Amino acid sequence: ALLGNGLIISAVACGHHLHTPMFFFLLNLALSDLGSICTTVPKAMHNSLWDTRDISYAGCAAQVFFFIFFLATEFSVLTIMSYDRYMSICKPLHYGTLLGSRACAHMAAAAWASGLLYALMQTANTFSLPLCHGNALDQFFCEIPHILKLSCSRYYLRELGLIVVGASLGFGCFVFMVFSYVQIFRAVLRIPSEQGRHKAFSTCLPHLAVVALFVSTSFFAYLKPPSISSPSMDVALSVMYSVMPPALNPLIY
């Protein structure tokens, strides 16, 4: 993950021919991937190497905050990238006007700001709950569902309300991406030349693969049926959605 995302960041930053909206948003995606994997894996590696299982309360809160921050930002950036692909293929004559450098900077800033705001609310709300059932998490990093299992049940509604709001916003972004790609595929199929269709598809398929990887691993981790839930399964699913996307996204692109 470090090598692949670092290479993408270096290539986009140093290659002047890559200073386009598509690669600018790819740079932001790589930054969010780097941030998310550096939030969880180094501490897990440290605990494994030193044979410890401890993390401070402040360290746990910081881990929750940064993980949600980078995860929410990544999903926002993926949504913006679908809009970028929609504009480049469906409205190419307006592409340079509507997606200038200032507009791209504003959209990227909005993605990072929304991730920051949601992470602040989620972390403050989670760590304001009293822990009534000990302080041991069956996970390799501080994950909100496992923290909620330790809290008093009567405080759940406030936390669940915030999770529902986040899920609703995420679903709205997902619907926007689906709508964008329906329009994109309709436009691509109207391109007369096979070479033109291939070029259009080649710019969309990496983004589609990254979205599919991110959504499928996250949804399965959080929406799996209780009948298949177990400590080892929970850890395996958490690895899938927290480690696999940052490691595989650079390979896909």
Image: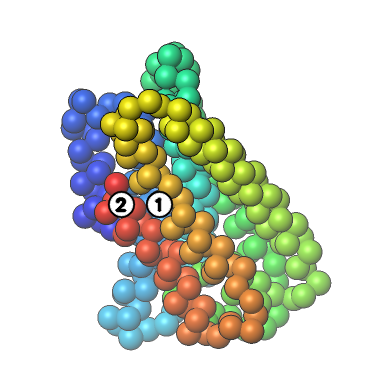
Task: Give the residue type at disc 1.
Answer: Ala
Q: Position of residue 39 (x, y in %)?
A: 40, 60
Residue drawn 74% across the image and 76% down it? 152
Callouts 1 and 2 close, C-beta under 8 Å: yes
- In the image, residue 145 sits, relative to residue 158, either above or below, namely below
Real-space CA distance between mark 1 and mark 2, rounded to the nearest whole angstrom: 7 Å
The structure residue drawn at horizontal position 61% and vertical position 49%, both measured from the top left corner, is: 170
Residue on which the image places disc 1? 209
Local crowd size for mark 2, using a 10 Å CA cut-off: few (<14), some (14–19), many (≥20): few
144 horizontally vs 250: left or right: right
Residue 149 placement: quadrant:
bottom right
In the figure, is residue 210 to the left or right of 12?
Answer: right
Q: Which residue is mark 2?
A: 252
**Residue 65 location in percent, x, y?**
52, 56
Question: Seen in the image, is 159 located left or right of residue 71?
Answer: right
Circle 2: residue type: Ile
